[in-house]
Image (cartoon, helix red, strand yellow):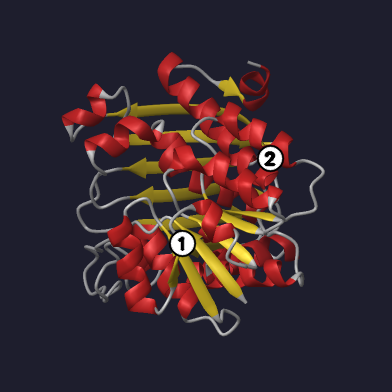
Amino acid sequence: MRIGILGLGRIGAFHAETLSGLDAVESLVVSDPFADAAKSAAERLGAEVADSPEALLAAGVDGVVVAAATDAHPGLILACVEAGVPVFCEKPVARTIGEGVEVLKAVGGRDVPVQIGFNRRFDAGFVAARAAVRSGELGKLHTVRSTTLDPAPPSAAYVAASGGIFRDCSVHDFDIIRWVTGREVTEVYAAGGNRGADYIREAGDADTTGAVLTLDDGTLAVVSNSRHNGRGHDVRMELHGFADSIAVGLEDKLPLRSVEPGTTFPAGTPHDFFMDRFTDAYRAELTAFTEVVAGSRPSPCTIAEALEAGWIAEACTLSLHEHRPVTVEEVRQA
């Protein structure tokens, strides 16, 4: 098949490289507002260059991967859907949850699949955790812990436009908690602090946060996030049930050092970047998209699914600023 890629920044270039190695993909068409980025990708991967999204959609593509700036997501998703071309778009759907809801309404009733990029759904550990919950081998869950700790904060410009740590970072934890447990979040309580970069505080955001989520069956989920984790990129999940407990991310590249005498785990070089931690998951995610394009599977993460994690992020952001518990229903009705 012939796949188009809109946006060739860090993640777009990475996706282009991944797609070029998939058996189902015969050719690529790439486009970026910065002509040099498109030219570089084309030369490296043998891709065709389109000078605009319109030209790319007119180039006979079977599917499109959107990795452009967040503000461009709604327009590009709608352009692809209106052209009848299946589309994969990196999260978030839009800059705000309200805009995301408008996108959902605009594509409603259209028979064109849209897949939103939540890559943890394709990580082998999280897939195995979901299977363990579904099989009942853990018994009833009582506690879930989800962690995302970045080795260093993004730039000041990125932070100012990100919408805050819950919308930008924690949303991955919120999505994977829903996906693994099969439960909905009903209430949140969030707290945060700033011990690092001043520009994060100046943007009205926190660089380190904790949130307690109450799920609809009474299970408690504890989410921990930070922009500053000197040892590396730490993404983990624990699931504790009445019959058994399991963990995702406890492997030799875990960026956590044990000080127990005689303990050699973890022994590997710590993960230092999200692309390192999730290389295989990204490949599996884009392979799934080629199956969506081929019509052999439905979208594994629809716009509606992606927005559910967004509502939790909205509730946590409000809770952080108002220092109180917030129900997800409250922010839906606001």
Amino acid carrying label 1: it is Ala
Q: Residues within 10 Å of mark 2 (few under 14, many from 20)?
A: many
**Nearest to the observer: residue 125 or residue 165:** 165
**Quadrant of residue 327 within the rendered picture:** top right
Q: Secondary structure at mark 1?
A: loop
Name the residue at 56% across, 85% down.
23
For the point 74% across and 54% down, the residue is 112
Percent x, y for residue 229?
Answer: 24, 50
For the C terminus, give its image quadrant. Answer: top right
Please tell me how crowded label 1 is: few (under 14), some (14-19), or many (20+) other residues with Cα within 10 Å.
Answer: many
The amino acid type, in three-letter code, at marker 2 is Glu
Viewer-side label of 1, 2: 1
Could you tell me residue 10's position as x and y percent?
A: 33, 58
**Residue on which disc 1 sits:** 50
Of 65 and 278, which appears nearest the observer?
65
Q: Which residue, given by chain and number where applicable, does mark 2 sit on?
A: 184
> Could you tell me if residue 217 is visible in this image?
no
In which quadrant of the rendered view does residue 99 lie?
top right
Left or right: where 213 falls relative to 16: right
Nearest the camera: 254 or 287?
Answer: 287
Task: Give the mark nearer the N terminus: 1 vs 2.
Answer: 1
Q: Quadrant of the N terminus?
A: bottom right
Q: What's the CA distance linking mark 1 and mark 2?
A: 42 Å
Q: Is any atom of residue 130 visible in this view?
A: yes
Q: Position of residue 14 (x, y in %)?
A: 38, 66
- 266 relative position to 308: left or right: left
Answer whether labels 1 and 2 touch (C-beta < 8 Å). Answer: no
Q: Which residue is outermost to the bottom?
A: 23
Residue 274 vs residue 265, the one in the foreground: 274
Question: Looking at the image, is 295 positioned above or below residue 45?
Answer: above
Give residue 256's quadrant in the image. bottom left
